[in-house]
Image (cartoon, rainbow, N blue to C red):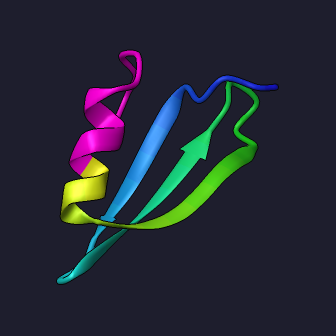
Amino acid sequence: MATIEVLGVDLGKPSFHVIGRDTSDHTILRKELTCTKLIERIANTPSRTI
């Protein structure tokens, strides 16, 4: 499994779209999260570029 190196966040009103990319610039994560879930996910993951 690839490791997320860059995390992109599209700031919406009630939800956020999150895209994770690996070192080869391939998309390996694509999710829609609420503000609370986004904060939980970022707080519980290793450091990376956002």
- Residue at 29 percent across and 76 percent down: it is 15
Rendered-image quadrant of the N terminus: top right
What residue is at 53 percent from the left and 63 percent from the top? 31
Q: Quadrant of the C terminus?
A: top left
What range of the chain is rendered magenta?
Answer: 39-50
Q: How many marks?
A: 0
Q: Which residue does the image show at 75% across and 43% down from the upper left?
A: 26
Residue 34 percent across, percent down from the top left: 28, 68
Residue 14 found in image quarter: bottom left
Query: Residue 49 in magenta?
Result: yes
Quadrant in which residue 36 is drawn: bottom left
Task: Tell me if residue 26 comes above or below residue 22 in the rendering.
Answer: below
Q: Position of residue 41 (x, y in %)?
A: 36, 40
Q: Nearer the viewer, residue 41 or 16?
A: 41
Q: Is residue 17 above or below residue 45?
A: below
x 42%, y 50%: residue: 8
In the displayed structure, 36 sits above or below 22; it is: below
